[in-house]
Image (cartoon, rainbow, N blue to C red):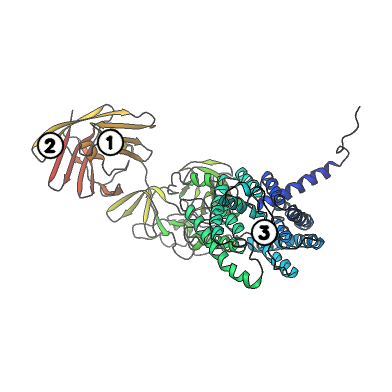
Amino acid sequence: MSGPGPFESLNPGILSSVRRFVRATLVSYAQILFSGRPLAGLLFLAASFAADPFVGLVGLVAVSAANLTALRVWHDRIRWEFGLAGYNAVLLGLAIGHYLPHGRLVFLLAVVGGAASALATEWLSHRLSKLALPVLGLPFLAFAWLVIAFAGTGHPPAHFARVDPLAAHLPGFVTSTFQAFGSAFFSYGVLSGLLVLTGLLLVSRISAAAGLGGALVAALLTLSRPVPELSINLIIVPIGLVFFVVPSRRMLWQVAVGIGLTALLAFALDVVVGVTHQPYLILPLTVTLFAALLLGRSKRLGVELVPMAMLRSPEDHFRAYLRRERPRPRLPFFGTWYVSQGVNGGETHKDRLAHAWDFMVRDERGRSFVTPGYRLGDYHAFGLLVCAPAAGKVVAIENGVVDNAPGKLNRVQNWGNYVIIEHSFLEYSILAHLQQGSVGVRVGAAVNPGTVIGRCGNSGYSGQPHLHYQLQAGPVPGSDALATEFHDYLVLGEGREQFFGRGVPEQGQTVQPMVAAESVRRLLLAGFDGGAAFAVRRDSAHVSQERWNASRADGDGAATVVRCGTTRVVLAEKKEGLSVRRVRGSRVTLLARTFEGLEFVPFYSRPGLEFQSGGWRHAFGRREPLATGADALVLESVGKGQERRIWFAEGIGIAKVEWISGSRHIVAERQR
């Protein structure tokens, strides 16, 4: 029988503590490049030792001191395990080993500096969290400058005298690129760069691509003029930008601007370094990232931030962004409502909450209540149903706030009763000021567009019954509001209605979600089962016949393909209307002229209803009788110097088409 293993006699609690400490140390290295992966941290740790083991050892001593200090002092162990206590210490220790002469004093400074950086990180995090800002490298900058000034060193770093054996086998530009990656850990060697790039690829291909862009720019710039610390700044800043900023079509130029600004700051500070003999370290990238964060908080220049509590990997953020590109929300109510406050409207829809709407109900005289208006029941909106704007999951509710008397405000519980629905990782809807006790959904419940979630009330910061709605970036009331558009709604005016397939309701408008009418649906979809034949009269003289053939589309879902010669039109039935997906081939046929400029036709009609699509303006006219006696709905369109009228008849579908362009006039009637 064999004896106990070397670790079997150890207390399991000690082993668990050691494992947690080692993990926190590795993640501290990973956090320098905005990752929480221990394996990436292990590769970054190895990179710090690759060029100069002494520098790597000093960095390890500093981060160990920081994590031990945080373990005793920090109250939030989760943040400690995520490496947030140690990443500044890693940089500080590596900088001390890199800039100061080797000796015992270096290790003493690493221990003291590492412990102090952990304390400073905790102090700064509490204060900056109130501003929704991260600590970044502020403790590192402060203590590194203090230590280097104390040591009084103005000599070039030791790595300049070292020979990289791998560099001799690679072109100079390739060597500079890999050395730029290694500079993130003050390790200016090709092997170090390979290890850092490998770790980045394990964490995020987006981060690796961003870092590669910064490395290439750094390599190009250093070929013409070597600038100390330029590489570390140009490596980290693009990785930080793709980490903090919500992915969008603007991200490439945002990263490019960030790299350019950081390079300009580095060149400017290089002049100061020549006078003070103090390195500027990561000051340029810190300035750039804080500028991006402040722009994102104020939603300026198109910069939008991932909420601090939800930061993950750029891939997670990118997937969430793709989900945000899905169909827009519907108006969160039934019937006709008035936009009392819109985007950037009034005093409460500003800055972070600019993209929000307040809806109330007004009568034909423009009043929101019936006299005397002293009771909540006098208000038209009070108690009306409120529904989910899009599919999602309920993540938070409040149902117990008392409704205010008219004219009174609850300044303590600003949002009153509310429901928050998660649509995607970065997309949440909040519907606020609901009636006390009316919320009819539970946390975790799945909802669909139109699902009733409560009733309109007057709770919270609300002087009269109304509904507050905003799409926001987080699951708590008051998260940053996101720009969005509603789909399929009507704007009602005097004697006219305008349909919007997508749009932003404006303050002062009266709006209504469009509800499909089955009768209109039958009119628009009839007659495409097998095809149709038309007698076409051109310019009151020439008469010809045009035949349309219809079939179901392969691979196009519920689409129908209508053909005439080389002309091909793809039609798809949606919940709210008929979508014209494509018009291809010859544009001189009646088929092409019938559907030109018609991207979407709603299953809803009233005389005077207007909508726009494809650069054309469309309107439903009054019903007119055909020569056959059938009653037809007329759709009139104007665009690109042309006019068109289409008659839709019950059981027939398109019964007649009239097309006018200058002196040309085409009239086509369907043959039975």
Q: Amino acid at mark 2?
A: Arg
Tell me residue 194's x, y (percent).
Answer: 63, 46
Label pair 3/1, CB-CB below 8 angstroms = no
Residue corresponding to mark 3:
160
Circle 3: element type? helix
Q: Is residue 351 visible?
A: yes
Mark carried by residue 408: none
Residue corresponding to mark 2:
537
Report how far apart the C-alphas of labels 3 and 1 lie in the structure. 80 Å
Pick whichever of labels 2 and 1 is earlier in the sequence: 1
Label pair 3/2, CB-CB below 8 angstroms = no
Q: Residues within 10 Å of mark 3 (few under 14, many from 20)?
A: few
Q: Amino acid at mark 3?
A: Phe
Q: Residues within 10 Å of mark 2 (few under 14, many from 20)?
A: some
Instruction: Using the image as rendered, state which of residue 417 and residue 125 is in the foreground.
Output: 125
Tell me residue 87's x, y (percent).
Answer: 69, 55
Position above or below: 579 against 486: above
Report how far apart the C-alphas of labels 3 and 2 lie in the structure. 86 Å
Q: Quadrant of residue 495?
A: bottom left
Q: Residues within 10 Å of mark 1 (few under 14, many from 20)?
A: many
Residue corresponding to mark 1:
523
Q: Is residue 75 visible?
A: no
Tell me residue 563's x, y (percent).
Answer: 26, 31
Q: Nearer the viewer, mark 3 or mark 1?
A: 3
Q: Is residue 227 left or right of residue 90?
A: left
